[in-house]
Image (cartoon, rainbow, N blue to C red):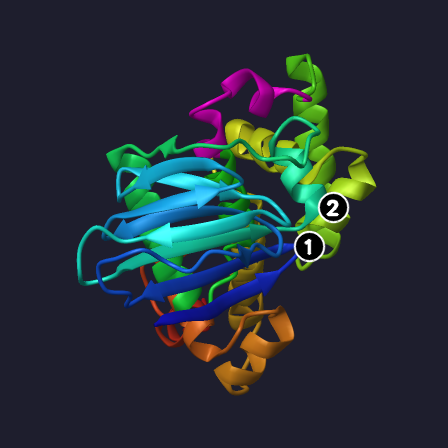
Amino acid sequence: MLHVRAVLEREGVGISDVVCRHGAGRGHAGEYTGGHAVVFVRRGCFLRSADGVEALLDPTVAYCVNPGEEQRFDHPHDGGDECTSIALAPELAADVFGGDPQLPIGPLPVGPALDLEHRLLLAAARRGEDVSESALNLAAQALAGVDPARVASGRPATARARRALVDGAREALTEHPGRPLPELARMLAVSPHHLSRIFRAITGHTIARHRMRLRARAALDRLAGGESGELARLAAELGFADQAHLTRVVRAETGATPAALRAALTGPRP
């Protein structure tokens, strides 16, 4: 009746595709939650009762899960439902909600842009892309719908401090592009969520995208230097998931494939 498929587990963030085929009727009482999560409804409609609080959920809202909640799901219609669950380690749940790991009770409003963003996130995770940073930011956006001031708390206060923080992250990533977000945040003495938000606000792109841009430029440098080996080996050495991932990122950055760029960058010179 219920099928949960994990599509990402990385850096304290988990993304699961949850499909329920329950028919119309009352659900089973006494189900207990395991951890913190923000859940987006993709299809269907159901009534969730958790610790005595009822909420009708459909694709226009998301909801939060806290550890140990007793919950029941009732379905007014046949056909079941489908959801995307973003699980958060306790420290990340506290990070995105102003220092308190107890996430809010009740529905979170999900507008059209946020709904599309969550569907694109799931599609990217299914392709094997590392979207842990984007998932953390998506959860924060949903939580900001009920308490924006709380979610925004803890940011560096001045423009100079924010710029210095971003410069520190860029410096660390230049040395090791693969540094995960939690490690990067610890190095800079900030929380992962706030580092991610400030980095995107200052640079216009995520830390994950910055990693890929650094790796793409390293690939261009190797190709221009006469790299003649297999692209699969180059992809592995530079930290891409595989050759297809290398090709996808380089094409997105330059508009051309690595093979075409190798021919162009190593052509005859005067």
Looking at the rendered image, the quarter that the C terminus falls into is: bottom left
**Residue 230, image x, y percentages:** 51, 87
Q: Is any atom of residue 262 visible in this view?
A: no
The residue where tag 2 is placed is: 184
Q: Residue at coordinates 72% horizontally, 26% vertically from top-left?
A: 164
Amino acid type at mark 2: Leu
Q: How crowded is mark 2: few (under 14 residues within 10 Å), some or many (20 or more)?
A: many
**Residue 231, image x, y percentages:** 49, 81
Q: Is residue 253 above or below residue 226?
A: above
Of residues 69 and 164, the one nearer the viewer is 69
Question: Image check: 57 left or right of 245?
Answer: left
Q: CA gap, disc 2 to disc 1?
A: 6 Å
Q: Residues within 10 Å of mark 1 (few under 14, many from 20)?
A: some
Question: Image check: 100 left or right of 250?
Answer: right
Magenta stretch: includes residue 152:
yes
Q: What secondary structure prevails in the magenta region?
A: helix
Q: What stretch is highlighted in magenta?
A: 141-154
Question: Image check: 88 left or right of 117?
Answer: right
Magenta stretch: includes residue 43:
no
**Residue 195, image x, y percentages:** 65, 35
Q: Is mark 1 on a helix, strand or loop?
A: loop
The residue where tag 1 is placed is: 180
Q: Is residue 217 above or below residue 88?
A: below
Amino acid type at mark 1: Pro
Q: Is any atom of residue 142 visible in this view?
A: yes
- The answer to whether the residues at label 2 and label 1 have Cβ atoms under 8 Å apart is yes
Quarter where residue 99 is shown: top right
Q: Residue at coordinates 42% horizontally, 25% vertically from top-left?
A: 145
